[in-house]
Image (cartoon, rainbow, N blue to C red):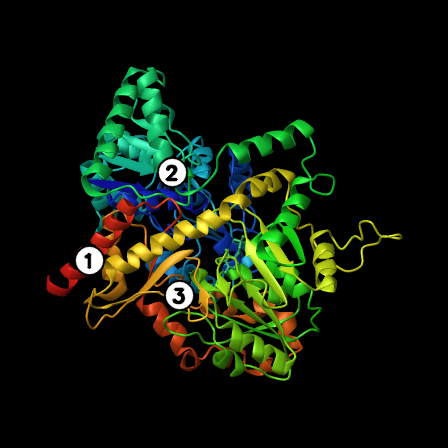
Amino acid sequence: MTILLAVGDCFAAFLLGPVLAELRARGVAFRVVAGAPEREVASLRAQLGNDATVHVVADEGAADRFASEVLTGSLACVAHLGAGVLTRRLTLLARQRNVRVVGLDGGVRAFGRPAGLALASTGCVAGELERLALAEHDVPAHEVAVVGDLVAKALAALPLPSQAPPKGLATLLEHATAADPLLLEMLERGGWPQRAALPEHAGVAAWIARAAAAEVVLTDSIAWQRVAVALGVPCVVTPAAGLWAPGVAAGLVTQMEPNLGAVLRVVARAARAGRGPGPVANESAARIVDVLQGVPKATAFPLPSEGDATGRTFGNDEAALVAMVLQRGTLNSTRGTMVTTFEKRFASWVGSQHAIACASGSAAVHCAIAALQLRPGDEVVTTPITDMGALTPILYEGGVPVFADVDPVTLNVTADTVRAQLTDRTRAIVVTHLFGNPCDLDGLQALANERGLVLIEDAAQAFGATWRGRKVGTVGRIGTFSLQQGKHITTGEGGIVVTDDADVARRVFLYVNKAWGYGDKKPDHYFPALNYRLTELQGAVALGQLPKLADVVAARRTVAATLQQALAGVEGLVLPRDPAHGTHSWWKFAFHVDRRLVPGGPRALATKLQAAGIACAPHYIQKPAFQCELFRDWRTSPVTWLPLQHNPRRERAAAMFDPAHYQGALGGLDSVVVLPINERYTQAHCDYVANAIRAAVGALRHG
Ligand SMILES: *Cc1c(COP(=O)(O)O)cnc(C)c1O
């Protein structure tokens, strides 16, 4: 069975992420049709830079305003990508108003220097092509507008011209007349000939044919809802999508939550209760349930997921504590007791003098960096293989992040790789205990002592890991943790900073609280800082979670030991282990695949595992942090640009990221496969995963 995913615009596309993961986990094959499904508004904004205004059309009022703004005034040209419903409508309207229409795919060179330019796309307008087009025509970024399907709705109310149809439309007509009532309607109203095929858009027709062959169409696009209904294929719609009313009435369009498990439950409940839009709808809902529920049994063994209750440890304790907060009615921590109690208990659990809770793991790192009181352009040596939330704080505090290479097996920095990056401007070392595996803290602390540097341990992934008997996070001057959904314990979002240094603790406390001196005789805002507080609701959950942490770590260690044993001797794999002087706390089980012994390497292996419902990640974060867009051009943001102004590296910023210096990071990422594990894995789950890995390696080696 294949499911077709049709993604109309970038705003809704990100919602499909969890659905994709869920489908992969269940081994369901799927195809995606979209302009650029994985790109989101945030990345669009990042690419356009800070001074760009991006119009987000989130409701019909906005769509109306947008249409009248964009298609009047000094607009010289509408450049479009693809041939989705929006593009069709907008180009029609533009033509009617004598605005030039150019297809960006291939048509880029056809126009001069327009005074204004609207990019209309049902996909996302963030691709390389668009950037090139903009640069080539010297178009100021603030004149770029992004539009979604809702605009099409607004435009649909307007009269259509009677002239020759634009290119893309003609092709659609050729192949899709029977499938798309919208097209039929346009055809009628425009008085256009039905068959004027243009081969370059034949791809759209192929997708319509695939939709016809699919069991279910899963989409956020109104246009694809129409197509599905015309084809008689059941259609499931994400919450961000507008529902096409006739489709709902026909019982072929069903709304869902962005999580397939939840969808199944909602749809099944509706089907059983006999509620919903009508009898036909229930029939089709039941059909979707049949189709989707049949799959996991056939192909996969459902594994506990950290994304929901199956892989987490919530219970009555958390619920009761949250209820208590609501009964008291004090939801903020400055007047409450949950967060402060959690801080005390966490300090005692980890073995530090002070613990200060905050809004996220990123905020925790930010607090730690802020406590250093860097001078502009000071350097902080850190790892390129970590969460971005551990890196941007350095920039925000005026520091220049300098990346040390990592060990190709552990992917952790070492004293040697850090030493190679030290200069007289280095002030601190921030290490990440990746996947829960402690870095060599002996070497790193000795280096920090020798050079008078502050060692910060980012232990977001390493709750309960130890180094020579001490919990990590307490060896360096400052330790940070994250309470984000996927970490050992969680409050959804959240973080905590630990230290034995009273001055650091004071500075961090202030940093979480807009630097307002609560409790001081003459309090003031002492320096610039944000509100990074955790709420009492989160504090309550944290208090409920903390007593479970020891068991969580123990359970994860058992899972890892079971996998190590079951996979011992599989040729071509390098398995993770405890370090010589410490214990791993197994946030993930990351192993390496030798592509000389296992043809296709990590990617081929991961594809097979994903088909077996094991949501693993080949290459972990895909690329070292310094290859992210953020570091491509330091001038695009004052946050990256200003620290560099105070550092001699500004003359050769690109040289900081020479791949020749990062052989460990690049090589390590190239061979690693990261297996998700959690405390709810049983022996049966471990057996299933280990057998799937053995089978996949065997198939790749001998098949
Ligand atoms: C998760 C994580 C962070 C960021 O934590 P958030 O709570 O997501 O902001 C920072 N560093 C590392 C190593 C992490 O794994």
Residue at (56%, 47%) from the top-left corner? 73
Q: Is residue 516 left or right of residue 48?
A: right
Instruction: Please name the residue that numbered disc 3 is placed on.
Output: 578
Which residue in the protein does label 2 denote?
259
Residue at 20%, 42% (x, y): give it: 299
Q: Disc 3 on helix, strand or loop?
A: loop
Q: Are marks 2 and 3 in contact (CB under 8 Å)?
A: no
Name the residue type under label 1.
Arg
Q: Indicate which disc, 1 or 3, sits on the residue closer to the N terminus.
A: 3
Residue in front for this viewpoint, 75 or 348? 348
Residue mark closest to the camera, 2 vs 3: 3
Q: Is residue 164 left or right of residue 141?
A: left
Q: At which x and y percent is residue 513?
A: 73, 51
Compare residues 355 and 229 and report the one nearer the observer: 355
Q: Nearer the viewer, residue 160 or 181?
A: 181
- Between the residue at mark 1 and the residue at mark 3, the CA separation in whole angstroms equals 22 Å
Q: Secondary structure at mark 2?
A: loop
First in residue order: circle 2 vs circle 3:
2
Please name whichever residue, 345 or 382, is drawn nearer the observer in this view of the structure. Answer: 345
Query: Residue 694, which numbered label?
Result: 1
Q: Is mark 1 within 8 Å of ligand 1?
A: no
Placement of the C terminus among the 4 image quadrants: bottom left
Kindly report the distance in space between the C-alpha atoms of the residues bearing marks 1 and 2. 30 Å
